[in-house]
Each structure stands twice: as structure tokens, then as C-alpha cells.
Amino acid sequence: MTNAKPFRILVVEDERDILEMVTYNLRREGFRVQEATSGEAAMRYLATDDNVDLVLLDLMLPGASGFEVCQLLRQDPKTARVPIIMLTARGDETDVVRGLELGADDYVTKPFSPRVLIARVAAVLRRRAAQAPGPDEPLRVGELFLHPGRHEVTVAGEPVRLTQTEFRTLHVLMTRVGWVCTRAQIVEALHDGFTDVTERSVDVQIVGLRRKLGAAGAIIETVRGVGYRIVDPGDAAEAPAGA
Ligand code: CA
């Protein structure tokens, strides 16, 4: 990927080898890269530079952890919207869930290939550049179409009958195509003070959705131990989560 105006990326990583590998590959792709080897250094840097487009954040850092950095970035209005991709240890789904719930946008599992990392960075920047859909905006992913105002779902033009909770679950996922939603995030989005939705019942909604959507249900991907996401079948450039 080459950019007319290069994107600026802050890489926060204390392991020298990984830092060098990441930095080298990002620069080769035309990104401008700033390095930080601790959470404190990252926070200091972000206090002086308003133009960081994305933060690659290792979770295991000396001093302030990646979680703390993530939380601080989200609390500060200046950095609240900067995309964060976490670098996590393989098999640490609990860390991934915690990070996503603290406001990280995506994650890459170590060890990762430069190709996967670059693809994820590009995907996050692309999704962030796209306008977030409004709450009443009709949504389409492949053959699946959802109209919030009309409470209507069709697959290849054929109507699909969903329960209220199934419909809202699908709406949450379709509003955030490509992003992983944790169960707790889905529960929060569904909460209206009347319906009693638990994290376990999210799984039940997904089973129902997949069954009713038929072949189109395959776009709802289970991210094991983390949650769910909808993958646009047209988005072939994107590597699966944790690959
Ligand atoms: Ca580390």
C-alpha cells in the first residue's frame, strides 16, 4: 500500500526484535513510523503529536500495561478516536476480550507474519475512513440486506423472519462489518431496559440467525473465545482475526 499522504503509526513494543521487524515492514509499505518501548513513552509521545493515525500496542509492557495505555487513550478526547490494534500472545483470548472492551479496535496474535500485520493495519485504516452508518441506515453485506426502519431482512431479495432480538443482534454486527464484537459489547448494544439478554443468550441468538439466514449465515464468523463478527465476502484482502 502506498499513500499520497503517508499514514502515521505509533508502535508500542518493548521487545527489540519485534519492534524492528514491525517498523521495518511498515516503513517499507510507505507508513511513517514512530517507536515507543513503554506505555509511558507512548503516552508522552501522544501528548505532543496530534497526527497519529493508528497505534500498534503490545499488551505486555514494562510499567504501564497495554490495557492501561488503551484505557487512557480512550478517556482522552484527543486520542479517543485513534484506532488501536493490540499485539497479543497466542491463546490469550481473555486478554483480547479485555482489550476490545477497553476500546481497542482489533488485535494481531504473536507470532505474526509481516503480511498479516500490514493487511490488518490497512483494513483498520480503511474501515475507520469509511463513514459509520447511522442508526436508521439500510445495510447490505453481500446478499444480506437489513432495513432498520422497516424492520426488514432479506437474503437475495427473499424476506427472512427474525425475532426482535435476532434482528437487533444482526443489526449490531452489520453496523460494524469487519470488527470483532465481544459478547458483552453485543449485550450492551441490545440492552433496552426490557429485554433480558445475557452473554450466553447471545450465542443462542447467533445460532438462530445462522439457521434462518441459510447460506448467507456463513458471513457471521465466530472468533473463538472472543465473540463474533461479520466478514464482507467481497473483502478478500482481509486476513481472518488472529491469523
Ligand atoms: Ca512485550
Image: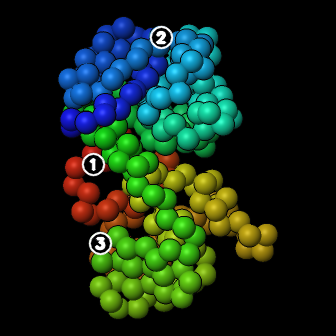
Q: Label 1 crowding class (10 Å Cα cut-off): few <14, some 14-19, many 20+? A: some
Q: Label 3 crowding class (10 Å Cα cut-off): few <14, some 14-19, many 20+? A: few
- Going by the numbered disc 1, the residue's amino acid type is Glu
- Going by the numbered disc 3, the residue's amino acid type is Gly
Kind of element beneath mark 1:
loop
Separation (CA) of disc 2 from disc 1: 28 Å
Residue nearest the viewer, comparing 73 with 219: 73
Which corner quadrant holds the N terminus?
top left
Location of mark 2 (residue) = 37
N-term-proximal mark, 1 vs 3: 3
Q: Label 2 crowding class (10 Å Cα cut-off): few <14, some 14-19, many 20+? A: some
Kind of element beneath mark 2:
loop
Residue 109's place in the image compared with 140, above or below, is: above
Tell me what residue is drawn at x 39 percent, y 44 percent.
124
**Percent of width and height locating residue 19:** 35, 15
Kind of element beneath mark 3:
loop
Which of the numbered marks, if any, corresponds to residue 142?
3
Location of mark 1 (residue) = 238
Which corner quadrant holds the C terminus?
top left
- Going by the numbered disc 2, the residue's amino acid type is Thr
